[in-house]
Amino acid sequence: MRDAEIRRLWAANLLCAASVVLTAVVPAFFLDGFTVLGTHLTWLCVCSVCVGTLNVMLCLVLKPSLSPKRSSLGNKISRFLKCCIYFFMSCILFHAIIVLYGAPLIESVTETFLFAVLLSTFTTLQCLCMLGPNIQAWIRVFSKNGATCIWENSLQITTTCSILGAWFGAFPIPLDWDRPWQIDYFRLMVCFQ
């Protein structure tokens, strides 16, 4: 049983990684002038939609969190609406955190919000797919030694690494690029490309 769960988790993670890579390559065939750096807003939207859709489909197909009770249609609609509200709240929260860490408040609001949506897709959406809108389950999973299965352990790792990766990716941005050695280093790197 555990080996089968590990294989399912491995396949799910490979599919998610492949979807991120494919969002950088495939749109170039359909959109004129598409590059990840040149049309970064388009890429943020495409990546968020693809990863989000894949996460929801994997949750429906692999069923990592089987609920022992059957629920009515009204309960399912209520859970879906709560999940949508939680996802939107997480987008707003990540946007506020990104602005508090130094992103421009007015000049780049679209870029900042789309980055918050992407970060919410990698963190909150996976939690909503596996745990649902149950705050007690979220607290249990993200508390020390709270994961009870391999899927919850993977959820902890993915969420933590996504947030740390976003922070470490933004960490070198405030460097002063007016220093002579930085300009020379940049010119050197451009020459080798």
Image (cartoon, helix red, strand yellow):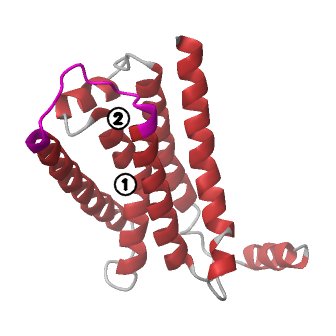
Residue occupying the point 49% across, 78% down: 41
Q: Residues within 10 Å of mark 2 (few under 14, many from 20)?
A: many
Picture coordinates of residue 77 (x, y %)? 15, 48
> Foreground residue, 15 or 70?
70
For this rendering, which residue is in front, 69 or 65?
A: 69
Callout count: 2
Residue 97, position as x, y percentages in the image: 32, 59
- Disc 1 crowd rating (10 Å Cα; few below 14, some 14-19, many 20+) is many
Task: Please indicate whether residue 84 sits to the left or right of residue 12 in the image.
Answer: left
In this view, 181 is above or below 5: below
Sequence-wise, which precedes: disc 1 or disc 2? Answer: 1
Q: Residue furthest right?
A: 192
In the displayed structure, would residue 94 be above or below residue 158?
below
Classified by dominant secondary structure, the portion drawn in magenta counts as: loop
Residue at the far left in the pictured view:
74
Task: Give the distance between the C-alpha atoms of the residues marked 1 and 2, in whole angstroms.
Answer: 14 Å
Quadrant of the rendered image containing residue 25 = bottom right
Question: Image quadrant for the C terminus?
Answer: bottom right
Q: Which residues are magenta?
A: 61-75
Residue beneath the point at 21% across and 51% down: 86
Residue on which the image places disc 2: 130
Question: Can residue 36 be spotted in the picture?
Answer: no
Callout 2 amino acid: Met
Q: Which residue is identified by label 1?
A: 120
